[in-house]
Amino acid sequence: MKIKFFGLLVATATILSACKTTQTADISKINIKQVVTSPDVTLVDVRIPEQYTAGTAKGAINIPLAELQNNIGTLKGKKVVVFCNKGIQADQAMEILKKNGVEAYDGTSWKNVKAIQNETEKK
């Protein structure tokens, strides 16, 4: 019984440590507020055009997630922050951009990016 429990404990610890992604490691090193407010950043809202039109962050361009792969060329060589409504599409966009060598950062949601912008403007 003790051996099974110990084996389960070791397996659980291994699985949990394997779940750490490079994206998670990168986030701790990056201050997203500095990136969002950087003058050379490109803000990309990956939601559908109707959602983008209803509200987005200041200065953001709209490249829906479904069209992102076809627009990689326009983003290469730029510092890009991607965001959506809740961060799910932004995570998918991050994978696409990173695989294609684009310097990308996860802004999570448009409300998060907009709040960072508003906070910076107040200072």
Image (cartoon, grey):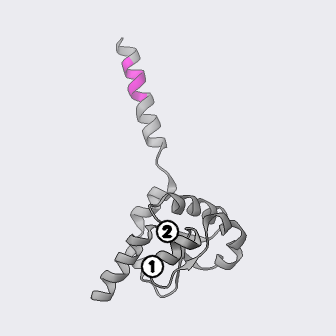
In this figure, which residue is indicated by the disc labeled 1?
57
Question: Magenta stretch?
Answer: 5-10
Residue 7 falls inside the magenta stretch? yes
The image quarter containing residue 98 is: bottom right
Element assignment for label 1? loop
Magenta span dominant secondary structure: helix
Question: If the image is split into quadrants, where does the N terminus sit?
Answer: top left
Tell me if I can see residue 31 in this picture: no
- Give the residue furthest to the left: 123
Other residues around mark 1 within 10 Å, as few (<14) / some (14–19) / many (≥20): many
Q: Residue at x 41, y 28 (%)?
A: 10
The image shows residue 1, relative to residue 52, as above or below, that is above
Q: Position of residue 116 (x, y in %)?
A: 36, 77
The image quarter containing residue 68 is: bottom right
For the residues labelled 1 and 2, say whether their Cβ atoms are less than 8 Å apart: yes
Residue 60 falls inside the magenta stretch? no
Element assignment for label 2? strand
Numbered label attached to residue 16: none
Q: Give, as a three-letter code, the residue at label 2.
A: Phe
In this figure, which residue is indicated by the disc labeled 2?
83
Given residues 6 and 82, the one toward you in this image is 82
Q: Give, as a three-letter code, the residue at label 1.
A: Ala
Sequence-earlier tag: 1 or 2? 1
The image shows residue 89, relative to residue 14, as above or below, that is below
